[in-house]
Image: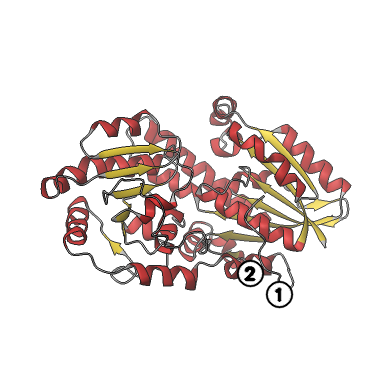
Amino acid sequence: MRDLLYLTHRIPFPPNKGDKIRAHNVLRYLQRHFHVHLGSFIDDPADQQYVKPLASGCASTFFVRLHPRLARLASIPALWRGESLSVAYYRHQAMRDWVRGTLAQHRIDTALAFSGPMAQYLPARTARGPLHRVLDLVDVDSEKWRNYADRRRWPMSSLYRREGRKLLEFERDAARGYDQVLLVSRAEADLFRLRAPESAHKTGHFSNGVDTAYFAPQPGTPDPYHGASPLVFTGAMDYPPNIEAVAWMAERVMPALRLRFPELQFHIVGARPGPQVRALARQPGIHVSGAVPDVRPYLQHAALALAPLQIARGIQNKILEAMAMAKTVVATPQALEGLSAVPGRDLICAATAIEFIQRIGEQLRAPQAFGSAARERVLHDYQWERNLERLGDVLHVSPAASPLPEAAP
């Protein structure tokens, strides 16, 4: 097998949040076809335990411990250098040295950078010749910062708008130099073609998938709600769009719903809830679970799974996982952007607080059967093995493929 260099901005295990789910499944795919040299940052000390298991499946590995607070401070000079803060945040000399040494030591002619900031590490050529470079942007992150700016007051709105502008400059510059640019959905790819028309001809996408054997209906699992049938939101609770979504739900939707359904509960299930999220539990009917060992029972025994995101980029794995478990999902148009799910057939779309109140109320009074169609949609459109073939095409992988290995690192 050929050697390949794979760089990720976050260690690709455990697959417990959107970017790590994608990065992990990409790694598993690459390991079937290449001797993989993996370079990653670790921003959570709990992830240090996965270094050795990951290393055992790779030709070589290098992990840099990234301290978020120190990295933010170190990125501040980017403000007067005219650079993106996000790119500066992930700039590290040790990673640069390891990449240079690895390319010099091994016969590597192909490299994949996962997320925009990692593009800064890959040169166009090595001593042996041109390096075939593929950039998996995943989402158009610069657009996310533009969205943040529209929802914040000055001075943060100004800072976020600047970051959106500078990050787009970097994304466009990186795309010009790379051989191929990939994103997580057709909608994200279309957006990047609009923002970076000079690279439209080499911009494509491959969608995420779902482990549909793991995320499957499991009616026999223990009920974490003890007989209640609540609404549930799942996701990393240190992510600003998730924080905003659950706050909006708790403050704008739940009070009206509880007037009609006094016993109704809203459970927020996800790791690292900060003070703003924990404070929501003071309101009647709101529960904050924090990290749980297995999210599936919380989906299985919920009345509805919610995705009331006001800002969303790419593919929302939380929606796909709930659909795979045959749950009825109520989501905003923003959360559905990029998904092939059809509102009214596979799930429910609601744009405003009033629509959320109406649609949820209708489902609580007379549930409609969306679950079977939801799971069928996932089985048809969101299988990792099938979707990763698009990545294989741009990495010049032979069409012949062996079954995906187990999910362990």
On the image, numbered disc 1 is attached to which residue?
Answer: 399
Give the labeled residue for mark 2. 389
Which image quadrant is residue 111 in? bottom right
The residue under the point 77% across, 43% down is 99
Q: What element carries label 2?
A: helix
Question: x%, y% of residue 355?
Answer: 20, 56
Q: Is mark 1 on a helix, strand or loop?
A: loop
Residue 83 vs residue 352: left or right?
Answer: right
Kindly identify the amino acid type of the residue bearing the numbered disc 2: Glu
Q: Residue 376, percent across and down?
A: 42, 72
Q: Which residue lies furthest to the left in this view?
A: 259
**Where 94 falls versus 7 (above or below)?**
above
From the top left corner, tell me how far across and down residue 388 is, in percent.
61, 65
Locate residue 193, reporting x and y percent. Answer: 51, 62
Instruction: For residue 43, say whether it is visible.
Output: no
Q: Residue at x 32, y 62 (%)?
A: 328
* Circle 1 residues within 10 Å: few <14, some 14–19, many ≥20: few
- Colour scheme used in the picture? secondary structure
Q: In this view, does 19 lie to the left or right of 233?
A: right
